[in-house]
Image: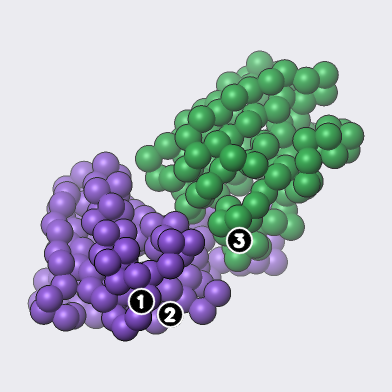
Amino acid sequence: MDPAARRLTLPARVESVAVFRDFVRSGAVAAEVPAEELEKLDLVLEEILMNIARYAYVPGTGAAEVAVAADGPGRVSVEIADWGNAFNPLEVEPPDFSRGLAERPIGGLGVFLIRSLVSSIDYRREADRNILSFGFPGPG
Amino acid sequence: MTIEPTELEKAVLLKVSGRMDAENAHEFEQACEQWITRGAKHLIADLGGLQYVSSMGLRSFLSVAQKLQSASGSLILCRLNGLPRQVFELTRLIGLFPVFDSEQQAIAAL
């Protein structure tokens, strides 16, 4: 991550999502990410943070750190770290799209959305941290 | 997010506006469940004013639709546009719900 990246650490809870969102948006606006892409960026961020809040920690405990840096014209790179259980969301099975309404599983859509909206995504476990980094905007 | 309900002859129309996210998606689900408890069989969600929906919101739509379907009812969507439409398309949920361009078309389908 660019050493000039801005960083913010907050409790990994649903109440922190809006604060992280404003923080990442300000980095994206500074990097001249087009305004019509910002809600997609909110979505990627929310999905990642909610996974951390639900799966990395006993819910309501632990923290997440978000870093954002410009990455070329109109682009940002974002890195999200936590100190919880090792969890690679990129290994989550894709949803089973063949099922009808009654059998369609309710989970698994978040990671699928994340992958659909970013240009690149990478997970690594470094010491006691999960680190997920992505490039934005994606292709569509 | 705001939810404005209107009771119609054969359904309840819920006009949903704003952002449906992890923090408030349960409010939509609760509002729907209250109408189901009061006997509503068909719910029409007018999403013309919905700007944003995350997977927690999708979870609520699916859960409500599954409950209604098991009681021979339905959750009907109308005026699904912009990012919410894209999210329903990407996750291929769009084919699981009846989706109409207008409230009138949704009502006429009942």
Query: Could you say whether the residue bearing mark 2 is in a helix, strand or loop?
Result: loop
* Label 1 – label 2 distance at C-alpha: 10 Å
The residue at which mark 1 appears reads as A75
**Position of residue A87 in the picture relative to residue B67 (left or right):** left
Kindly indicate whether the residues beneath marks 1 and 2 are on one polypeptide chain: yes
Tell me the chain of label 3: B
For image coordinates 24% across by 56% down, the residue present is A23
User: Which hue belongs to chain B?
Assistant: green
Image coords of residue A106 (percent x, y):
54, 52
Disc nearest the viewer among 1 and 2:
1
Q: Is residue A93 visible to the viewer in this orientation of the structure?
A: no
User: Which hue belongs to chain A?
Assistant: purple
Mark 1 and mark 3 residues within 8 Å of each other at the beta carbon:
no
Q: Nearer the viewer, residue B72 or B80?
A: B80
**Position of residue B47 in the picture relative to residue A43 (left or right):** right
Q: Earlier in the sequence, mark 1 or mark 2?
A: 1
Mark 3: few/some/many CA within 10 Å (<14, 14-19, 20+): some
Amino acid type shown at disc 3: Gln
Q: Is residue A21 visible to the viewer in this orientation of the structure?
A: yes
Image coords of residue B93 (percent x, y):
65, 57
Mark 1 and mark 2 residues within 8 Å of each other at the beta carbon:
yes
Amino acid type shown at disc 2: Ser
The residue at which mark 2 appears reads as A119
Mark 2: few/some/many CA within 10 Å (<14, 14-19, 20+): some
Above or below, comparing residue B86 to residue B12 in the picture: below
